[in-house]
Amino acid sequence: MANSPPAYRNRPLSIRSGGKSKGASSSSAGRTSFSLSSLRGQIQPELSRKLFRLIKSENSLITAHETAGRERLSIAQQLSEWGEQTGDDAISDVSDKVGVILSEVGELEDTYAHALDESRGRLKTIRNTEKSVQPSRDGKAKIADEIGKLRLKEPESARLVVLEQELVRAEAENLVAEAQLTNVTRQKLKEAYEAEFAATIERAEKQIILAKHGRRLLALLDDTPVVPGDERQPYLHCQQARQVLNDCEDDLRDWQPDQETYQEFLADQMIAANAAGSLDKSNYEGLEKQQETSRVSGVHPVEGESNQSAEIGA
């Protein structure tokens, strides 16, 4: 699978130790940033112009998810550092481990951005195929236009025969190109958004895992109000908090895509499509038999209904 989950090994129980270096490496990693040099080639053939714009918009979306991931990591680091300086053992421990959860949410955004980039690459294949087909369309149209003009000016011109032969060849070449375009478009469109939806499901389900374990951490923080002058009970949940992170790591590692549900959905769709096709065929055959009977009897169904209505009225 292209967007396979990263290996979860030796997950840190804190983001304070080595957290800054991790954040720095994460922010510098990723895809090559957008530059003005990528503006070249914006003049696209008409056939590929709309998809070109869509791909550019996808690039902005990917950058937004990468930015969101980096911001999550930064916020997680700041939360942990703030909790440490409060001097409250409970807040310090819980905030640090909540920061670990938030940093994982940020990593999910980066993984999702890479999956979107792979999906975008499949759309580029369609765009490139569209660009390759455009000259074929233009060449065919140019020859047809030239033939039309020549017929008006010189109907008896010997060049007409040559142009018509060129038009036949151009139409044959275009026919092959158009067939390739529709094949590539269907295949790559399906692949692109199958990859995107699979990545969306993975991101959402892992976010749910992280959020649930994050709430388990918050439940360890005693927020019962104390009377001024009284001391709060000491924090005794360090081991439990570590276990929550261990459980979270296990759940993320054990996560698997639910391919069976998707395959069942596809099977149901195929059955429904086949049933609809059979129904249409039976309706068509019934109508055909009705028309054949009408032709043999010499009475049109509508006329027969009109005559019957007249007799009832009489």
Image (cartoon, rainbow, N blue to C red):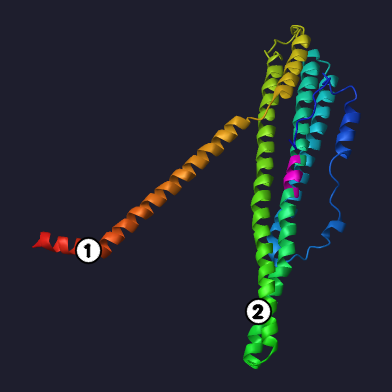
Q: Is residue 33 above or below residue 132?
A: above
Q: How many marks?
A: 2
Kind of residue at disc 2? Ala
Q: CA distance from mark 2 to mark 1?
A: 50 Å
Kind of residue at disc 1? Ser
Q: Are marks 2 and 1 in contact (CB under 8 Å)?
A: no
Q: Secondary structure at mark 1?
A: helix
Residue shown at the point (78%, 37%) measured from the top left: 110
Residue at the far left: name it: 314
Residue 53 visible to the viewer: no
Task: Work out which quarter of the rendered image holds the N terminus and state it.
Answer: top right
Q: Nearer the viewer, residue 122 or 225?
A: 122
Left or right: 121 as drawn, with respect to 151: right
Relative image position of residue 163 (x, y in whole percent):
69, 82
- Helix, strand or loop for the magenta stretch, by majority: helix
Relative image position of residue 17 (x, y in whole percent):
89, 22
For the record, the magenta segment spans 115-121
Q: Which residue is mark 2?
A: 144
Residue shown at the point (68%, 16%) measured from the top left: 219
- Packing grade of label 2 (10 A; few <14, some 14-19, many >=20) is some
Q: Nearer the viewer, residue 262 or 65?
A: 262
Q: Which residue is mark 1?
A: 297
- Packing grade of label 1 (10 A; few <14, some 14-19, many >=20) is few
Residue shown at the point (68%, 70%) measured from the top left: 137
